[in-house]
Image (spheres, rainbow, N blue to C red):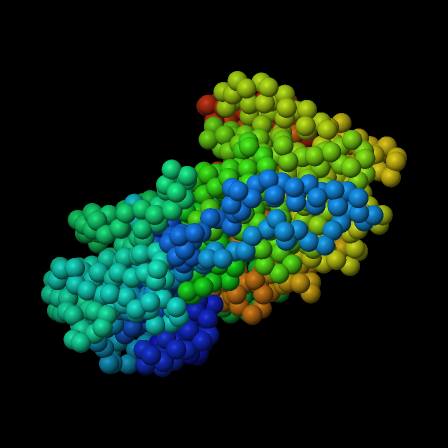
Amino acid sequence: MEVFQVLGNTLWVCLFQVSTALHGILPYSVRERLLSALGIVTYVSLIPSAPPSFPSSGNEIFLPIGNGYLGAMLPGGTSQEVTQLNIESLWSGGPFQDTSYNGGNHLPSQQSKIAEKMQNIREAIFSSPTGTIDNIDEIMTPGDTYGSYASAGHLVATLDSTDSVSKYARWLDLDEAVSRTTWSDGSTTFLRESFCSHPLQACVQYLNSTTSHVLPTVTYAYTVAGVDGLPAPNVTCLDDRTLSIRNYVYIPGMLYEILAQAQAPSGLVSCSAVSGASPPNATLTVLGASEVWISWVGGTNYDMAAGNAAANYLFQGPDPHNHLVTLLSSANRTSYAEMLNGHIKDYTSLVAPFSLSLGQTPDLNTPTDQILAGYRTSTGDAYLEWVLFNYGRYLLASSARGTLPANLQGLWADGYTNPWSADSNINIQMNYWAVEMSNLDVTRSLFDYIENTWGPRGAYTAQVLYNISEGFVTHGEMNIFGHTGMKLGGNSAQWANYPGWPLVKVIYYGTFGSHVQLNFAQSVASFHLEKLIEDLHFNDSTLVTAPCNSPEQVPITLGCAHAQQLIWQLFNTIENGFEAAGDTDTAFLDAVISKRQQMDKGLRIGRWGQLQEWKVDMDLPDDTHRHLSHLIGLYPGYAIASYSHELQGGLIVNGTFMHYTKEQILNAAETSLFHRGIGKGPDADAGWEKVWRAAAWAQLANATEFYKELTHTIESNFAPNLFSLYTSDGIFQIDANLGYPAAVLNALLQAPDIANINIPLQVTLLPALPLTWSNGEMKGARIRGGITLDFAWNDGRPTTATFTVDQNVAGRERDVIVNYGGRVVAQFRSNGGYSQTVSSF
C-alpha cells in the first residue's frame, strides 16, 4: 500500500514504515504487536505540496486530541486507523481494588507512637554533628495499591479498500484543534477528521469521500490488545448504531464504559454480535454511505467528591452508563458540521485571548520530524520554537479541562501501568507554569482536585503523621485517591519527604487574588504554622522544617532551602490576600506575620559562593542533580527573584551576622545554576530539568545561556511527534511540553511576585531575548494585579507596549514599574480601568 505520511507543522516526509509513525506514541513492543495483529505493512511515497485545507499559518502538528474528559492518540492510517483511547479518571489501585486502602497513612491508633518517633527523629537531626540522619522509614508507609493511570484500549476503524494509496498526508491543526488525514485511493480522495469536543464531552471521527463517491464498507471495533493487563471487555450492541464497551481496569477495580455511535445519513448502520465470542464482542458496520462519523463518550464510576470522611474515602460514584447515554444523545442531536463548528468555536475562544509571534516564517515544505532532526543547540529555528510554544498550550488546553488536572502524561498514557503511574506528583506545578501569563483559563480542575483529594485526607495526614490538628498536608506523590502520606520504598525519603513542594500552585494562584485559592493557602498555612520548629542544631533562634529533604536528594536534614523559601512565600500570600479574601481572623494573620519574622528564609551563601540547598553547607560543586529545588525562589517563585535585604537579609552564619544584598543573592544563585550543569547529569537527562534551567537563566537575564538551554532541550528531549521525553529511552513525560511555554515567556516578559503588595511590582520587557527572535509580538499577556499587556518589538527593541487594568481589581491595586534594558520606561498605579501605552524605549 503506497501512502505518504505528513508528520506535522508544515510537513512532508520521505520513505519510512508506518510503524515509525507510531514512534513516541506506543512502546515498541506494543507497537509491533498491534501492527502485526492488524496486518499493517505499509510504506510511503512523496507528495510535492501541502494538501487542501492545510493551514497557511503553519500552526499544526499531529496526533494527540482531547477535551480533558477524554483523550485519543491518532497513529494515522488509510484503510485502518487504530485510535488509542483515554478516560481521565481510569486508574487501577486505590479503594476500588483494596477496601483497606487509606491513602498511604498510618492508623489513628498509631498517632501517639508516630508523634514520639517524629520527636526522636528531630532530636537526632539536631544533635547530629552533620545535621543529617540516614532514614526516616519508621514514619513512612508502603505505597500498596497506589495504582496507575491506564489506557482505555483502542478503537479500530476499517475501510474496505484494496486499491493503491497515494498522496497521503496528516496533520493536527493547532488553530482549530482538529486532526485531519487525506489520501487518494485509486480515483477517490478521502478525508478523515478527528477531534474531542469539550462542550459535548465527546470525541468524533469523521470520514468522507471528497469526490462524492460512496464509501466502501466501514467497520468499527474495540480491542484491548496492546494494553497488557486490561481484562477482556464486554462489547455489546446498545442499539443498531451503538457499541457498548464495559470493563474493569482490574478485578476487583474501577468500572469504565465507552459508548460509540456511528452516524451515516445516506447509508445503513448496523451492529452485530461476534458469533461465539466470550466475553461478548460486537462490531458496527456502515454500508452505502457517502459520509460517516463515529462519536464516543466514556467514563468511570470514580467520583472525586466522594473522597472524604463522610463517604469513607471511597471515591466511588454511580455506574457511568446513564450519564453516558445522556451525553451521547446530546452529542448526536446535531449535524456533523454543527459538532465541528461548535468544537472549533469553543477551542478558539479558549486560546485566542493570547497570541505570540517570534518572527517565525512557516516552513510548509519540510516535515516536522525532519525539521527536528536538523535542529541544533544555540542555532535554533524560530518556527519550530513557536510551534512548540503553541503545542504546549494546546496540550494543556486539551488535557486540563475535565474533572481532573493534567497528569504526568497529560491525558495520553498508552499502557496499563505507566512510568511513575502517570500521576500528579511534584511535576504538576510545572504543568501549569504558563497558564496565567498566557491567559489560558484551565485551572478549575486543578483546584477542585486540591480541594477534594489533597484537603480531606491531607487533614488526616496532618493529624496522624505530624500531630497537627490545623490545615492539611500532602507529599511528593499523589494519585487520584488522596494518597497524602509519605510513600515508603527503597531509600524513599528523597522521593517523598517534602510536604512543602505542593505549595507552589497554592502560592502562585493565591497571588492572583481568587477567594477560593486564598482559602487553600490559608488552610496549608495553618499546617505550616505548627510544623515550623526552633532550630536546635544551629541554635540561632530561627524556625525551620525538620525532618526535610530537598526534592529527590538523599540528605535528610533541617531547614531545606526550598521548603523555607516556599513557606515564607506562602505566609506573604496570606498577608497580601487577607483583605481581598474578606478574612477577619486577625489572630491568625498575626501568627503568620510573627512566624514569618522568626523563620529561616532559606537563603544562605555557602563556602564556594553557592546558594545553599540546605541550611547545613554540604552542597557539592560537581552535583549536577536534575532538580533546582533551592532555586525555586528564582523561578517559578520570587524569594530570590524579588529578594529584599530589608525583609530577608538578616541572619547569623557561623556566629556572624550577615546581611546579603540582592546582587549577592543573585550571584550565588547564578553560581549554583552554573554548577548544576545543562540537565545531562548521571542521574537523569530529562526534558523538564532543561526547561527549568532555561527559565532560570532567563530570570537571570542571560539570553545566551537561556537560548542555549532551551535549544538543547529541543534537540535532546523531543520525539518526532514533539512529545517531550524523560530520557533518550523514549519515556513520554509531558511536563517539559507544558513548562516550555513558560520558559519562553520568561525570556520575553517578567513580573515576579513581591513579598508585600505595597512594594512596586517590577515588570521587565525582553529580559533575555535571543537574537533569533529579534522581531515579534505578544498580545493578551496577563500580569498580577489584573493587568493585560500587548507589546511588540523590532530589531531586538520594544516598539510599543500597552498596559490595560481590569475594571474590578479591588484589593489587588499595585504600583507598577516597567523596565527595559536596565532602566525604567514607565510607572503607574494599577487602578481599575487604567490604560497606558508606552512607545519610547
Residue at 68%, 28% in the rendered image: 595
How many numbered markers are drawn? Answer: 0
Where is the N terminus found, in terms of image quarters? bottom left
Rendering coords of residue 461 (x, y %): 53, 41
Q: Is residue 832 above or below residue 120?
A: above
Residue 430 appearing in the image:
no
Q: Is residue 215 above or below residue 324?
A: below
Left-right relation of 827 to 790: right
Where is the C terminus found, in terms of image quarters? top right
Q: In the depicted view, which residue is nearer to us: 40 or 382?
A: 40
Q: Is residue 689 above or below residue 594?
A: below
Q: Is residue 802 above or below residue 52?
A: above
Q: In the depicted view, which residue is nearer to us: 545 or 781?
A: 545
Q: In the depicted view, which residue is nearer to us: 513 or 839?
A: 513
Residue at 56%, 44% in the rendered image: 110
Residue at 78%, 59% in the rendered image: 622
Quarter location, residue 615: top right
Rendering coords of residue 634 (x, y %): 67, 42
Rendering coords of residue 454 (x, y %): 49, 42
Left-right relation of 201 to 350: left
Q: In the depicted view, which residue is nearer to us: 317 or 378?
A: 317
Rendering coords of residue 819 (x, y %): 66, 34
Residue at 30%, 69% in the rendered image: 232
Left-right relation of 344 to 213: right
Residue 538 appearing in the image:
yes
